[in-house]
Amino acid sequence: MTTKDLYEQDYPAWLEETAKQLRQRQTDVLDWEHLVEEIEALGNEQRHKVDSYLLQLLIHLLLYQYWPEERERCARGWQDEIGNFRVELELLLESKTLYNYFLTRIAVIYPKAVKRVRQKSALPVAIFAETCPYSPEQILDSDFLP
């Protein structure tokens, strides 16, 4: 059975075999097509996680700041979620590449967060800043609440 066939039939075995081939520097037998595909997918997955945690974190920061009618009832849960999303995001951002990616995504993700908050709360669009009101440092600061 070729490594390409193994990929289609037994993915965990393909991973083990590919890792063995890489350790032994058997580049002539590597399943390059699938190896490149998997490496690209891994990078995409990490960036998607940054986007997802950033979106959830911004949603909860915005809810906390702009929905005072619900803050008293929901503050504890929102604070817990803010803390959880920060921890997950910080773990990903230990990678300098992902940190730089995070910096570029704040402006992209912020409008999506506003849209989600408006759907949940029916708050008027006019109360939200046009650009993200939080600095990258504030977004990640475990002591910061708006």
Image (spheres, rainbow, N blue to C red):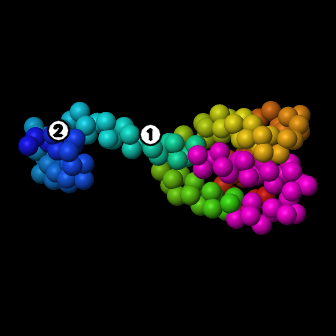
Instruction: Classify 82 as above or below 4.
Output: below
Q: Is residue 17 above or below residue 107?
A: below
Q: Amino acid at mark 2?
A: Lys
Marks 2, 1: nearer the viewer: 2
Task: Answer left or right for 39 relative to 57.
Answer: left
59 sits to left or right of 70? left
Q: Is residue 117 left or right of residue 27?
A: right
**Residue at (10% x, 40% y) in the render:** 2
Residue, disc 2:
4
Nearer the N terminus, badge 2 or badge 1? 2
For the residue marked with disc 1, what is the amino acid?
A: Asn
In the image, residue 62 lies at what x, y percent? 78, 48
Q: Is residue 69 magenta?
A: yes
**What percent of the width, then of the height, locates residue 76?**
77, 66
Estimate how packed mark 1 is, as few (under 14), some (14 to 19) or many (20 or more) residues with alpha carbons within 10 Å: few
Q: Residue at x 61, y 41 (%)?
A: 103
| Secondary element at tag 1 | helix
Closest to the observer, 31 or 10: 10
Where residue 124 appears, as percent x and y from the top left, is: 88, 37
Which residue extends farthest right?
Answer: 69
Question: Can residue 36 be seen?
Answer: yes
| Residue at figure coordinates x 32%, y 41% from the top left | 38
Q: Which residue is mark 1?
A: 44
